[in-house]
Image (cartoon, rainbow, N blue to C red):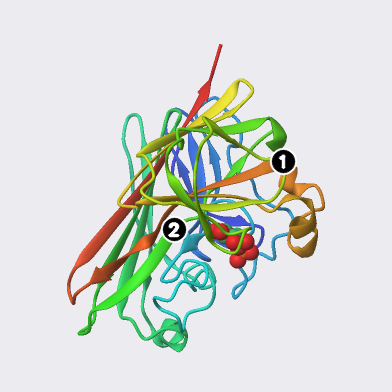
Amino acid sequence: MPETSLIDFHGLPALRILAPDGAQAIVTLLGGHVASWIPAGGTEQLYLSERSAFEAGKAIRGGVPVIFPRFGTEPEAAQAPRHGFARLVPWTAGATRTGSDFALGTVRLESSAQTQGYWPGAFSLELTVCVAGSRLDMELEVTNSGADAYRFTAALHTYLNVAEVEDTRVEGLRGRQYRDQTAGGELRDERHDAVVVGDEVDRVYFDAPSSVLVRCGRRNVHVEQSGFSDLVVWNPWEAKCASLADMPANGFRHMLCTEAARVGNPIRLAPGEQWVGRQSLTALTLP
Ligand code: BG6
């Protein structure tokens, strides 16, 4: 019986979640970060830059960074750094479970003197990662463990591994309004059946559908979400990629971020309240 175990991943402790059918995910304790996902009988589905720092205080470039309590430079939790601090600090390993056709693992982050150096909120975060067959499920649970209410934004900043970004399409967003972050935050309506990337793309789609399809040749990924009301589509393209020290020059060609996000409608949690957001990816190979 395969077993979920603690491994070393680029010098970082990580949970290797392994299902009986061979599906596996690797979650580093730094950032509670899903760094790899290989479906049963499949190949790596997440982009991971080999130039990532893999050290505390720096975000891993690729995989699924957990963005909390601040997406980008949103006004909520404004003391926190851009894209929050959950991706910068060590989490702890929680419960793991293996069934006949799945395996899951949890990682946790509790507020501490370190996190309160970034932002005063008291919280408990739990990320549950489950692999089964061709599917990866990620669930982020946030509990307000303090005495004061607060508001925050969040995301699962998923970097999909694509063969060639120019041949990739994101389908299902037609008719949705988006904030174009490459055009000073202008609001636009999506008029196309598919988002294609031939330049920098940095868009927050508000009130996103519960699922989109990312097509790249015969390899496709079905992306579903709940709790997260928005979907961010991001590719830095050539110039911005060159300015990112932790990306190889051609890295932008092999990644596309489809981020389950909660940006337009921040979450408010009163003391003791909880919020849950989920993203699921299913790898599909078309005939
Ligand atoms: C995306 C943002 O979510 O993350 C982009 O919409 C940003 O604006 C990108 O450039 C990467 O951010 P970072 O902080 O990981 O370099």
Q: Is residue 89 above or below residue 163?
A: below
At x 54%, y 24%, the residue is 41
Q: Is residue 63 above or below residue 243?
A: above
Q: Which residue is mark 2?
A: 155
- Which amino acid type is marked by label 1? Gly
Residue 143, by quadrant, is bottom left
Q: On the rendered structure, is 57 left or right of 188?
A: right
- Which amino acid type is marked by label 2? Ala
Near mark 2 (Cα within 10 A), the count class, few <14, some 14-19 or many ≥20, is many
Q: On the rendered structure, is 123 left or right of 49?
A: left
Find ligand 1 in the image and state its quadrant. Answer: bottom right
Upstream in the sequence, badge 2 or badge 1? 2
Q: Is residue 62 above or below residue 126?
A: above
Q: Position of residue 157 (x, y in %)?
A: 51, 54
Distance between mark 2 and mark 1 Cα atoms: 24 Å
Callout 1: SS: loop
Query: Which disc, if any, is residue 198?
Result: 1
Callout 2: SS: strand
Quadrant in which the C terminus is drawn: top right
At x 42%, y 55%, the residue is 261
Query: Which disc, if any, is residue 170?
Result: none
Q: Can residue 164 be seen at all in this image of the molecule?
A: no
Q: Position of residue 198 (x, y in %)?
A: 72, 40
Q: 179 or 91, which is in the foreground?
A: 179
At x 75%, y 48%, the residue is 251
| Ligand 1 within 8 Å of the CB at mark 2 | yes
In this rendering, the label closer to the viewer, 2 or 1: 1
Q: Is residue 265 above or below residue 201?
A: below
Q: 248 or 128, which is in the foreground?
A: 248
